[in-house]
Amino acid sequence: MSRMKQLLSAAAVSIGLSLVAAGPGEAAEATAPPEVDWSFNGMFGTFDRASAQRGLEVYKQVCASCHGMDLLPYRALVGIGLTPEQIEALAETFEVQDCCTEEGEPFSRPAKPADRFISPYPNEQAARFANNGALPPDLTLINKARIGGADYIHAVLTGYEETPPEGVTLMPGMYYNRYFPGHQIGMPPPLSEGVVTYSDGTEATVDQQARDVTTFMAWAAEPETEQRRAMGVKVLLFLIVLTAFLYALKRKIWADVH
Amino acid sequence: MDANKTWKNPVVAWIDHRLPIFSMMNADLVDYPTPKNLNYWWNFGSLAGIVLVIMILTGIFLAMHYTAHVDHAFESVERIMRDVNYGWLIRYLHMNGASMFFIVVYIHMFRGLYYGSYKAPREVLWMLGVFILLAMMATAFMGYVLPWGQMSFWGATVITNLFSAIPLVGESIVIWLWGGFAVDNPTLNRFYALHYLLPFVIFALVFLHLWALHVHKSNNPLGIDVKGPQDTIPFSPYYTIKDAFGLGAFLIFYLGFVFFAPNFFGEPDNYIKANPLVTPPHIVPEWYFLPFYAILRAITFDIWFIPAKLIGVILMFGSILILLFLPWLDRSPVRSAKFRPIYRQFFWLFLVNCIVLGVVGKNPPEGHWIWIGQLTTAYYFAHFLIVMPLLSYLERPRQLPSSISAAVTPGGLGIPARGAAE
């Protein structure tokens, strides 16, 4: 009886905790994003390298005109399978303001792999000025910083409607999005059929581009994911075996008490 | 302490004669007589101690890479996550360790509530535990501010603003706490300093907690006193192995989150850098504060001349401080709920009430959450102020067993603790 209660109480506590900790999902007033079967889902998921590299293309050609990825250095791109030569070549296409020459003058130079992704705007004021007062958020952590994570990012990128439903009046300069909280988003629909030409020949549908760029940003937000999971499997297997031995030992030591 | 213990190793014997540290460790960790009937709920005390050590160690390594400045704090945390070797592991251990600490300590406290571990002669032991909880809460709150995300900033703003409810001096106190006119760099700096200091205060309190524990020794599921050596077993090897097994099971749970769902307990908003100009739609504290947050927000009306906000603040602090008086609110001489049929029902009701309070704290204070919050807040206090004192007189406890060994091994042989046998 009391054992039963103990179990029940443990269950109650864990259910309670999970209810309490279930995340702020219910707080969002927008439609729930559709679930996508991401390559990086689950305990053993890994980033689809080809998709992440295509996502980098989408970011460079589309997103990067307004959004920075300030926390991501070019050198980190080895994580999605770019070679050091490719990274160097990519970095060199960007100019970075540096300080200083021997005379103390600021100068600009081509970016190096150790530089972080060069932002489209020199500062927040410039970004707001160019975007009707709105500040395009940095995308390095966007997958971790939104309720719903990758599913949400993908949903917003594909959730635009050209004409809002009846009864909805959009504020000037706003666009209707099914998944954005409040449905009015300042970002114009960023993706359209074939806006990016993939070098690997993949057909650049809107959904494909959204999936690829979301995969890229999922990696950028948590580049340690694969290492973390691989280590976790080993650590947990070790602990399960160790704990089983400890339990056997406990039984043996306690045998004379029971 | 066993002063006559002789040590074979001459170096150990030489040191022990001058500083009896080995005798002390032997008396408190090896021979230490422990009731033979402790169940697995008694594992959570040692687990809490281990989590504290994990938190201090991971915290020190994080401190080596963290920058406490509003312009750099957020980036320095991301640098730890990306560029520091195994920085992501250290940070996720620390971040999830905070949640684990509260899970373990809450279970430890509810175990104490169920088995009456706060009753004479263990009142001071219990009260020290309440002080540890308070210190933990302060530490956790300030630690959550350090990454300088949106929830860090706005959580700090909401909670420090509570002090403005104090009549006359409230506003001045808030400015004093902030070190300015808003949560800003001075606030972050002092929170960092205190976040580093308080764990060592907790460590000292834990030392006192253990000292008080070792005077009257552990309570047990029967809640009756140890009658003699037949009721106890030596701590080692019996409870060292039981605690080791419990630790293994706990680590599987803890590291499961660290490696596979490291942000389960967190808020996505905290991966957005703090912005004093943008308020998040819902400011919520970490899950372990939610029941208290619900109590804070429960009162929506002024009472007489006292504003609602001040009542909320008083109730929130009161909800923890009331635990200090528990040994005197519960006058029943029987400790364990096993023999208190009515208290046992109320214990479960109280547990459910606390969980509901947590759910209320998670939700915006609108609609039905308002009256549910008020009802559960009222019941939280009623449990301590009405139910416990009344039950002390109204409840008829069941017959207590004559001794631990009589109840656990009927007619069986007790294995005397080595220390107690001499």
Image (cartoon, coloured by chain):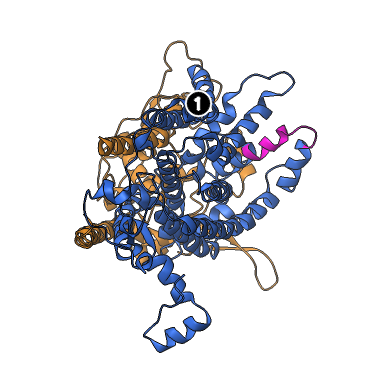
Chain colours: A orange, B blue
In this picture, residue A29 sits left or right of residue B63: left
For residue B93, which quarter of the picture? Answer: bottom left
Which x, y percent locates residue B74? 55, 52
View extreme (top): residue = A167
Q: Nearer the viewer, residue B231 or B162?
A: B231
Q: Position of residue B252 (x, y in %)?
A: 30, 53
Image coords of residue A150 (percent x, y)? 36, 40
Q: Residue furthest bottom?
A: B10
Q: Nearest the camera: B120 or B313?
A: B120
Q: Amino acid at mark 1?
A: Leu
Q: Which residue is more in the foreground, B226 or B115?
A: B226
- Residue A143: tell me if it is visible: no
Q: Is residue B162 magenta?
A: yes
Q: Which stretch is magenta?
A: B159-169
Q: Residue at x 66, y 35 (%)?
A: B162
At numbered mark 1, what does the secondary structure look like: helix, strand or loop?
helix
Report the chain holding disc 1: B
For image coordinates 47% across by 70% down, the residue present is: B1
In the displayed structure image, the side of residue B129 where residue B340 appears, left or right = left
In the rendered view of the protein, which quadrant contains the C terminus of chain A?
A: bottom left
The residue where tag 1 is placed is B390
Q: Position of residue B408 (x, y in %)?
A: 26, 48
Q: Is residue B421 above or below residue A37?
A: below
Q: Quadrant of the N terminus of chain A?
A: top left
